[in-house]
């Protein structure tokens, strides 16, 4: 392995244990509506679980413990929520591991889908990945989720492989997608 590449990987691996970046809460206009964007705290977990139920037809893909594990992780991560009229309507999470920023979760309330919120959240995670000197962004998406796959492709993600029986419910396959950070 080339010396320059090894150094880059070492820096990326080290950054995974480096200080946590602080995200500055702010108001953001998206498609003519004003939202507040801020970091997620452990106090938000109950609302995140409720949002999951609304997005995933009564299911909660992530239990409370998964949110706690991610939010308290020693790895560099960023979890953001979008509030409209003081209610969480969307969230995204990403974790840095070596030179990859993996998007662990993204959800947008059905009433707010197709309004640009998901695209905005992907851009925020991409900016975070860039600041962390990541080389790639990655994620998994259900094979049946046509709208999400379309959004990811439009955002520059490429399908790399199919993951058999990735999702417990229905043993559905996932598509593993990757985007180069530029």
Image: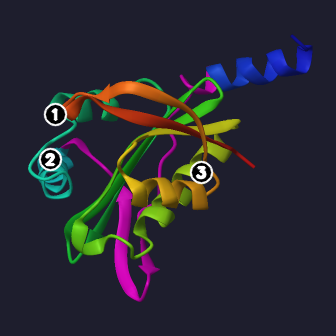
Q: Quadrant of residue 112?
A: bottom left
x then y, percent, for residue 50: 11, 53
Q: Which residue is mark 3?
A: 126
Q: Which residue is mark 1?
A: 63
Give the spatial CA distance, label 2 vs label 1.
Answer: 7 Å
Viewer-closest of 7 and 116: 116
Viewer-closest of 171 and 66: 171
Q: Which residue is mark 2?
A: 49
Q: Residue furthest top?
A: 1
Residue 158 left/right relative to 40: right
At horizontal 62% and vertical 23% (from top left) the residue drawn is 98
> Mark 3 or mark 2, which has the lower sequence index?
2
x then y, percent, for residue 96: 54, 31
x then y, percent, for residue 148: 42, 56
Label 3 element class: helix
Q: Quadrant of residue 181?
A: top right
> Mark 2 or mark 1, which has the lower sequence index?
2
At horizontal 35% and vertical 75% (from top left) the residue drawn is 35
User: Is 32 part of what is drawn in magenta?
Assistant: yes
Residue 114 left/right relative to 90: right
| 60 up-or-down from 106: above or below | above
Q: Quadrant of residue 111?
A: bottom left
Do the residues bearing badges 2 and 1 touch, measured as CB atoms within 8 Å?
yes
| 83 up-or-down from 24: above or below | below
Q: Which residues are magenta?
A: 14-42
């Amino acid at each position: 392995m080339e010396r320059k590449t090894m150094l880059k990987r070492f820096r990326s691996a080290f950054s995974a244990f480096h200080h946590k970046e602080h995200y500055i809460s702010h108001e953001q206009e998206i498609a003519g509506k004003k939202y507040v964007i801020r970091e997620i705290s452990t106090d938000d977990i109950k609302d995140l679980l409720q949002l999951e139920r609304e997005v995933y037809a009564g299911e909660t893909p992530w239990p409370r413990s998964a949110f706690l594990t991610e939010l308290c992780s020693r790895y560099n991560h960023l979890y953001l929520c979008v509030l409209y009229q003081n209610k969480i309507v969307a969230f995204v999470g990403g974790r840095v591991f070596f030179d990859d920023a993996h998007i662990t979760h993204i959800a947008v309330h059905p009433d707010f889908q197709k309004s640009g919120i998901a695209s905005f959240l992907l851009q925020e995670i991409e900016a975070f990945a860039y600041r962390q000197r990541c080389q790639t962004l990655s994620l998994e998406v259900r094979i049946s989720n046509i709208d999400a796959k379309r959004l990811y492709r439009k955002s520059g993600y490429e399908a790399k492989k199919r993951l058999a029986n990735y999702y417990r419910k229905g043993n559905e396959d996932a598509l593993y997608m990757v985007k180069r950070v530029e």
